Amino acid sequence: MLIRLLALASVAPSLMVHSHSTGHNASTLEELYGPWVSAATEIASSTESDFSRVVGLRWSAWEAPHWSGAIKPATEKDLQKVISGFNFSGKQDPFIATNGGHGPKTGQGKFTGINVNLANFNTVSIDTTNNLVTLGAGVKLWDVQRGLYDVGKEIQTGNSICPGAIGVTIGAGIGMMTGMYGLMIDTLKSVRVVTAKGHVVKASATENSDLFWAVRGAGVNFGIATEATYGIHDQTNNGNVTAVNFIFTAASNRTVWETLKKFDGNQPAKLSFQAVIKFDRTSNSPIIIVQVWYFGPLTEAQPYLDIFAAAVPATTSSSYLPQTDLYYQSETAGVCDRGNIISANTLGFNQTDVSSYEAHFADLVAFYKANPSFEGESVFQYYSNDVTRQTPQSETAFPWRDIQVWWLTQNKYTNASIGPKVDHLMRGQRTNLQKTSGFPTPHVYFNYAFGDEGAAAWYSAANLPKLRKLKAKWDPDFVFGNGAPLY
C-alpha cells in the first residue's frame, strides 16, 4: 500500500550552498531571479513586507546569518535554477539553503546573503508493502514520526519533532531507537541531490555510490538533498513506550554517574536514557533529570528501572505512552523553541568516567550561580551501539560508530553579554572531558557541533583524503560546505 502525506509545516535543517561572487546588477531580487523560476516561487528582499513569510529563519538567535533576501523555490527545477541558472551574470549574492535553521555553527553570524528556503519540499510517501518511506527535504521529524505511527510502522529519528529529517540524516542521525536500528544513515536507501552544476542525481548503493558514501555523514559538502528514501520497520510493542523520569538532587550526583556507568558496554537495545544537568532558579539549586525510555512493557523495563531507583531519586514519574507523545517528553525538545540565544557543544565518549562527570557538574553549578541569565543544559545521551557497530566503519563517511555516550550542551542564555564566558566555559569542558572520553582524538557528532572542532574531529583524519577527492569531483568550486569545511 502506498500512502502519500503532505507535511503541514515544513521546517528542517538542510545542506548549505553559496556562490563565491557577491553583489548583483539587477535592482531587485525579483528582477534577477524572477525570469528563471516558476510563478509559484516566492522571492523577497529583507526590506519587503513579506520577507518574514518567505525566509527560513534560524531557530537560534546565536550566530544567525544576515539575510539580504530570501527565495522559496516551488519545485526541484526551480532549485536547480537557483544553483546554476543565475550564473549568467556571475554577480549574484552568496546564499545558504535551509529548511528550518537548526544546526548553528560558529562564524555564520558573519554571513550576509540570500536565504533559499526549501520548505515547499514537504511530501511524505509511505510504501507499507515494501517497507519504504520517501521524504522531501522540507519534512520535519514529526511529519515522518506521526505518519509512520498511524500505519503501524516506525523509523529511528532524532529525539525532537521540529528538525528536518534529511538534515538530521546527513549528519548520521541518532536518537531513542538507535539501539534497535542503528543510525538514520543505516536505513537510508537512496537520495536525490542537486549538485553544484545544478544537475539532479540519484545516489544509492548502486548509483553514484561514491556520492552516497559521502552524503552519509558529510553530505553538507556535496549538494542539496531534495528527497530521500528509507527503510522502515514494523512497530515495536504496538507503538508504546515505558517512560520514567527520575529527578536527583545535587547531593546524589556521583551516585547518578556511577549508575550510568553500570550500562557501559552492556546496554540493552530497547533501553535508551539521558541524564540532564539543569539549574532550578526557583529553588536556586541544581538538579539532574534522568529520562529513561524502554520500547516495551513495564514488566520488561522494570529490572532496568530498579537500577536507577536504587540511586534514590528525589522524585519519580512514570508513564506508558505512544511513541508520538514520547518526542514531546525529551528534555532536548527545547530546540523547537525559536528566537532564543542557544549554542551547542558536544563530544562522543567510549566510557563513563565518574570523576570527570562529577567535576563537570561542579563547574556547571558554579557557572549557574555566577551567571543568573544562563539557562543551559548539559545532556549525556546513552544508546546501545551494538547495531551501529555492525555496519563497517568504512561503509559511510560518518566515522564514529564506536561512540557509547553522546554528550551535548544546549547553552541557552538571555543576556548576550555573557556569550564569551559561555564559550570559554564550554571549550574548557570539552578539553577536560576529552581526556577521559576513552578516545585518543575527539569524536564529534557534526549535528551537535559548535563548529570550531575541525574536519578531523567531524569526519576523521582517515576519511579526509577520500572526502577531499570526492569534493574535487562533485564540487570543485566549493559551492557547498558553508560551516563544515573539509580542509
Image (cartoon, rainbow, N blue to C red):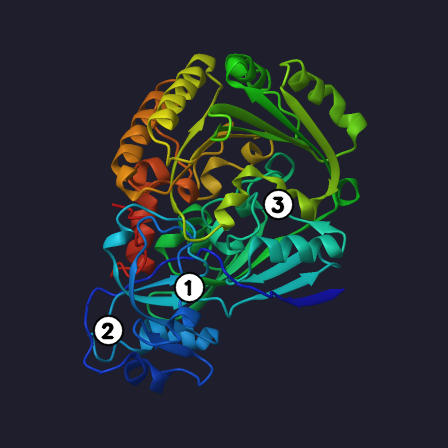
Tell which of 223 and 301 is nearer to you: 301
Picture coordinates of residue 238, whole percent (x, y):
79, 44
**Picture quadrant where residue 111 is located:** bottom left
Mark number displayed over residue 92: 2
Amino acid bearing label 3: Tyr
- Report the amino acid beneath label 2: Gln
The CA distance from mark 3 to mark 2 is 41 Å
Task: Give the position of the C terminus as an image quadrant.
Answer: top left
- What numbered label is drawn on residue 56? 1
Left or right placement of residue 233 versus residue 58 in this view: right
**Quadrant of the rendered image containing residue 478:** bottom left
Query: Could you say whether the residue bearing mark 3 is in a helix, strand or loop?
Result: helix
Q: Could you say where residue 51 lies in the image, as x and y percent from the top left?
A: 37, 72
Q: Residue 480 has which mark?
A: none
Residue type beneath disc 1: Gly
Numbered disc in front, either 3 or 2 = 3
Q: Which residue shows up at 33% across the image and 47% down it? A: 105
Q: Is residue 351 visible?
A: yes
Q: Which one is in front in this view, the residue at disc 2 or the one at disc 1?
A: 1
